[in-house]
Image (cartoon, rainbow, N blue to C red):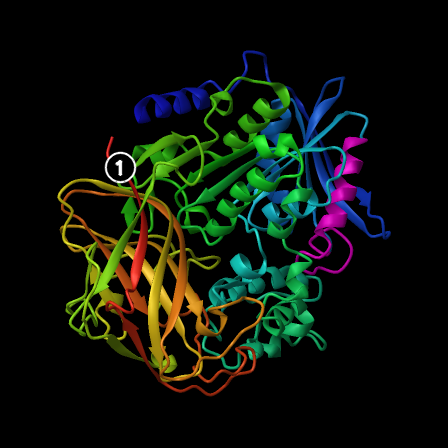
């Protein structure tokens, strides 16, 4: 079945060009589009040099519309009108740039403008990834009448919980590196740029993070508030309050009425949100076409990279077959033109299974045949580091001492690989060897015996931990690892929970020191075959820096906290407190 699906997929890509000659292409640059409030945005248009009306593919981007030339030319040659627009306040478009807040209205207005063009047949689809995926989702919840499909790639479902924060922790590396990159265009409108996400990464408080050396800036552009006011607002709203709720996608799935192809990636920073969008719209979409028209493709790297080799791992020749632009066009060939390609095969989900390194079609996500399996944490109280005695097994714990470690925010556990964006030069993303992390005494390490046969884990993963701390607030992190016979420890997926958000993302509650609490850490999801002779490992700690900001253990808001204290943290695993890793195991065929 796997091989047949892959052959069909490759043949579909190989036969994507039509027998007819491609269209010659007409390009129109910086076409003005006026929004409802009078602000003018600009778009480049690529269209077939031919009479008649065509389907429209629209992208709205903050990353410079000129970067979409290759896709625009390819789409127009295939008989589409491709329109790429700079969003408000970016590059050639007028207005003030502020993340998310204008994308619903501006997206609605642009879709309706595009549908009314003389060479448009009135049917508009959107495409693109990351923030460009957000421009699609935010337009879709406004349901413009002529929007007929979307193709959001590696994007979020909630701009609080799986964009700016995760488990209540600030996504520091992404937020600071992405904001620094965005601020380049803001600054270019005045003077020049100078971005390096690693500079200032240890600055406390977080609100003092300097995007640029203030000596290079003109008067009035020497702070986060002036260059990136949204960044200051993100820090000012650490909880899921009205600031975030008005932007939420997942709270408004019923407003989305169009089919969608969601493209996720296992090592992508927005993996969790993309999977939630597929599941959420399929269950709650505002039309039968939406509920029945959701498709999901999960590849490997996303923001962490593409191709066959990502990070330290070679995922084999099948990984090279992923071509996002071609897949996007084939999605619209199917959706708009009725072409019977791979999207018409009745299987709405295609995933890349790591370890096996193969593509596989599925009936849905999560997989119905997955068996939720409990792996309990065990030790004699000495699970610290790779040289400790922590184990994982299906046996329920009885009487065991807890594992303890000291978490010092001044010596945080370093980020090594994982779902990172957007400065790979200074912090490399993707699968990386975790042994340097596991050598630390402030990392608890729990491992299974080596598997006697290949074992597949595909689906959502969580860890339920019974914990205690000497502090009023601290973090707990969890990381799933595949360990080969040579010791190479490949990170698969990870999560974090800020303890004050253990009950609610809306109403934080500090801990009582030395009181035991049950925490559930969402590790998002993976699909991986643990080969015979490999073992499965769980790492537990209290920091993953600079991917996430350091919890200072004082209870102060992260935006203003300057001083920190060390915390003694404990993980319990006994009959009364059975800490457990929940895994979706796929039965062997």
Q: Position of residue 91 (x, y in %)?
A: 69, 53
Check disc 1 and report its element: helix, strand or loop. Answer: loop
Which quadrant of the figure has residue 210?
bottom right
Q: Residue at x 16, y 47 (%)?
A: 451
**Closest to the observer, 168 or 40:** 168
Quarter of the image with the N terminus in it = top left
> Pointer 1: residues within 10 angstroms few (<14), some, or many (20+)?
few
Which quadrant of the figure has residue 447?
bottom left
Against 196, residue 124 (above or below) is above
Boundaries of the magenta span: 89-116
Q: Residue at x 86, y 51 (%)?
A: 38
Q: Position of residue 232 (x, y in %)?
A: 63, 72
Q: Is residue 111 magenta?
A: yes
Query: How many numbered marks does the figure carry?
Result: 1
Q: Is residue 544 magenta?
A: no
Against 69, residue 488 (above or below) is below
**Closest to the observer, 456 or 297:** 456
Against 260, residue 36 (above or below) is below
Q: Residue at x 50, y 40 (%)?
A: 263
Q: Residue at x 45, y 27 (%)?
A: 347
Residue that mark 1 sits on: 587
Residue 30 in view (yes/no): no
Residue 282 in view (yes/no): yes
Left or right of 94? Residue 492 is left
Q: Position of residue 122 (x, y in %)?
A: 76, 27
Q: Position of residue 470 (x, y in %)?
A: 36, 84
**Closest to the observer, 428 or 7:** 7
Quarter of the image with the C terminus in it = top left
């Amino acid at each position: 079945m796997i091989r047949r699906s892959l052959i069909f997929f490759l043949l579909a890509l190989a036969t994507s060009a039509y027998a007819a000659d491609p269209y010659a292409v007409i390009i129109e640059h910086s076409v003005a589009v006026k929004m409802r409030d009078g602000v003018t945005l600009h778009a480049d248009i690529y269209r077939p040099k031919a009479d008649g009306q065509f389907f429209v593919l629209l992208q709205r981007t903050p990353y410079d519309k000129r970067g979409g030339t290759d896709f625009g030319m390819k789409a127009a040659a295939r008989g589409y009108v491709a329109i790429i627009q700079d969003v408000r306040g970016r590059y050639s478009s007028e207005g003030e740039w502020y993340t998310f807040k204008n994308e619903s209205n501006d997206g609605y207005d642009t879709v309706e403008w595009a549908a009314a063009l003389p060479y448009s047949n009135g049917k508009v689809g959107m495409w693109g990834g990351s923030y460009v995926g957000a421009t699609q989702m935010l337009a879709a919840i406004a349901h413009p009448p002529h929007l007929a499909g979307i193709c959001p790639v590696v994007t979020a479902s909630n701009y609080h919980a799986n964009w700016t924060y995760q488990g209540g922790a600030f996504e520091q590396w992404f937020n600071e590196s992405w904001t620094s990159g965005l601020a380049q265009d803001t600054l270019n409108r005045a003077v020049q740029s100078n971005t390096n996400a690693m500079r200032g990464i240890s600055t406390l408080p977080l609100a003092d993070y300097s995007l640029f050396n203030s000596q290079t800036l003109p008067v009035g552009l020497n702070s986060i508030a002036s260059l990136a006011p949204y960044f200051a607002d993100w820090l000012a709203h650490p909880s899921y309050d009205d600031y975030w709720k008005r932007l939420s996608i997942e709270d408004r799935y019923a407003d989305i009425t169009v089919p969608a192809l969601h493209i996720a990636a296992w090592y992508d920073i927005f993996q969790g949100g993309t999977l939630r969008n597929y599941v959420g719209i399929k269950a709650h979409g505002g039309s039968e076409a939406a509920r029945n028209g959701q498709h999901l493709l999960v590849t490997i790297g996303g923001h962490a990279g593409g191709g066959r080799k990502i990070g330290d791992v070679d995922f084999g020749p099948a990984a090279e077959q992923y071509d996002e632009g071609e897949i996007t066009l084939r999605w619209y060939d199917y959706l708009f033109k009725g072409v019977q390609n791979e999207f018409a095969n009745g299987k709405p989900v295609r995933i890349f299974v790591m370890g096996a390194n193969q593509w596989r079609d599925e009936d849905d996500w999560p997989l119905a045949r997955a068996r939720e399996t409990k792996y309990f944490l065990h030790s004699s109280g000495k699970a610290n580091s790779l040289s400790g005695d922590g184990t994982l097994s299906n046996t329920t714990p009885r009487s065991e001492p807890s594992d303890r470690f000291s978490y010092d925010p001044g010596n945080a556990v370093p980020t090594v690989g994982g779902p990172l964006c957007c400065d790979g030069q200074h912090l490399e993303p993707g699968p990386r060897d975790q042994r340097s992390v596991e050598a630390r005494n402030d990392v608890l390490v729990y491992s299974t015996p080596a598997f006697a046969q290949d074992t597949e884990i595909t689906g959502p993963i969580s860890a339920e931990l019974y914990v205690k701390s000497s502090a009023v607030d601290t973090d707990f992190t969890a990381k799933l690892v595949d360990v080969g016979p040579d010791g190479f420890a490949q990170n698969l997926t990870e999560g974090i929970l800020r303890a004050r958000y253990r009950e609610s993302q809306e109403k934080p509650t500090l801990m009582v020191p030395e009181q035991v609490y049950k925490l559930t850490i969402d590790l998002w999801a993976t699909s991986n075959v643990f080969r015979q002779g490999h073992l499965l490992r769980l790492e537990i700690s209290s920091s993953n820096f600079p991917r996430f900001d350091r919890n200072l253990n004082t209870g102060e808001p992260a935006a203003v906290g300057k001083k920190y204290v060390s915390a003694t943290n404990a993980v319990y695993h006994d009959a009364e407190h059975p800490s457990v890793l929940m895994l979706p195991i796929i039965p062997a065929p």
